[in-house]
Amino acid sequence: MTWTSYGATCSAPSAGYSASTFASAVQLLAAAQCFSEESLPDSSDQNFAAYDFIIVGAGASGCVLANRLSEIEHWNVLLIEAGGDPPVESSIPGYHFSLHNSDFNWRYKTVNDGRTNQGNQDGCIYWPRGKMVGGSTNINAMMYVQGNSEDYQRWFDAGNTEWTVEDVRRCFRKSENYQDQLLDQDPDIRNHYGHDGPLVINTFNSTERVRGNKLISAYDEIGIKKVKDINVANAFGAAIMTVTASNGERNSMSKAYLVPIKDRKNFSIMKNALVTKVLINDLNQAYGVLVEQNGVTVTIHANIEVILSAGALNTPQILMLSGIGPKEHLESKGIQTIVDLPMVGQNLIDHLLFPITVFSDELTENSEADDEFDNLKYFHNRSGPLAQNVVLDTFAFYATNEDAKYPEFEAYVLRKRKNSSGLKKEFVTLFRFTDHVADSIVELNQNHTLHLFLLSLLHPLSSGTITLSSNNPKDPPLINANYFADDNDLELMVSGIQKLLELLDTEYFKSIGGFLGRTRTPNCDELELGSREYWKCQCLDIVSTVFHPVKTCKMGQLESDSVVSSRLKVHGVENLRVVDGSVMPNHISGNTMAPCVMVAERAAELIKEDYNLY
């Protein structure tokens, strides 16, 4: 069905994943409104014989690469995506969680290691990854964080000489189109950002700015300094979020980088197509890919390069299915080893997250019914709750070590009014809490407003793995997150929690009667609330994710310790690169979307350099 409005057409009016009749009506109205993102023409009816570059995965990095490589008019570029077009919900910031349990993401889950997550159903948690054009940039929280300069200095110091801090910062600016008219008057902010790139950076049309500023003042009171802009402050302090949204609409990478080039004659996109294997000849040269679409498998040739941009989970999976990876593991799955690269799928690092339940007697200005009808404002002027993501649009970055060069923690808060309907369903579906855990939070929420602080450890020492469950490309990879395997992570996390809870002694939280609530978990109910042992136990029982996996195809110099070179070429294979978050050699002090865009901007420069075109 196609909806027409304001002289434009919109495909895919709704995914139909809303939780209520009211929300379904809102989605239908949204479809009739017609958002600015256009459907990209699918080139599947073409004869896919050969292209100069084949890019696998239309997520953050793949969208950037398709745009930048097709700038070279004599290069033919094909982008292959396992999913289809994003639904209308993806353009509405307030619906970003609605697609986390839908066909528009891979719906991955971690394995049950018997040690962590025993307060979660089946001992595992969701790791949603976008499966549509635009990838996870159509389901994420839109937070735009560049990271700390020390993050990238560590890349360079490890021997990745193409990645100087100056190059990294230049590539951020190259992507950016900063548009916050209020903050842009500050010369430090104006000079920090780029203004001519494809990616619009702004702040949300927030209805919670007054409360957000109160929280920022509370952070400032406990020593987490109030700053105007978190990126200008090098990812230290507390501030209003910078986001990839403007005028109440999400700015995904497909909207920013693909829609503007949809009519380029040297650019093609193939949707709903699963790449099952990279083809490699006897000279260890990549020459194409096998693709399954509508039950038919076809071979597509690459004249110059194959580039994997399928993300930190799917890229190592594709490499291993193609015979590139740890030999012993590949042979155990019946896969012939072409290149024995032991680090493929290893070194998995994620920003682990821990939920902290703070309650208060804060008065609520609106009823829940008022909030629902506030949503209708969205279709009048793109304001109201739907114009922002579901957390309060503030975040805080801090370290417990006063001499730290980069932050250890990132914190944000999800606020739920007293006796909030549907709260248990959210905890059970999104966090996969057991009834025992969810009920303890819901019971306190019956008489108190919930401030669910979400605290993320930015630089964990613990690492996990991505491995194959079988040699069938349709079987999901095995995700062993291995959270808190290093005891230092657990000790540091507890210190970070205790620092954050100093907020309860601030003027703001005292004024609303803020207090720490006990979350019941399987192994911790008898421990003293707020003690270090209590927090250690809780962390192990209900640790979660902020959906930031990296490093599974780490860049570096040695085949024994990395997967790609600093020019992102796969060791031991010619004409094959990896360009996505999996190449990061250490984690970033913040959300990973912006760095993934930067990585692809820099990669496009390196590729053009290699062919004397930059």
Image: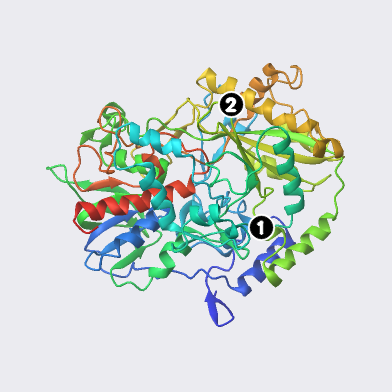
Horizontal side of 104 relative to 24 (left or right) equals left
Look at the image and tell me whether residue 474 can be seen: no
Residue that mark 1 sits on: 18
| Neighbourhood count class around disc 2 (C-alpha, 10 Å): few under 14, some 14–19, many 20 upward | few
Count of marks overlaid on the render = 2
Q: Which residue is pictured at 80% across the width and 47% down the height?
A: 417
Look at the image and tell me whether residue 301 can be seen: yes
Residue that mark 2 sits on: 402
Q: Which residue is pictured at 81% across the width and 39% down the height?
A: 508
**Nearest to the observer: residue 113 or residue 571:** 571
- Image quarter hosting the N terminus: bottom right
Question: The residue under label 2 is which amino acid type?
Answer: Glu
Secondary structure of residue under mark 1: loop
| Neighbourhood count class around disc 1 (C-alpha, 10 Å): few under 14, some 14–19, many 20 upward | some
- Which of the numbered marks, if any, corresponds to residue 4? none
In primary-sequence order, the first of circles 1 and 2 is 1
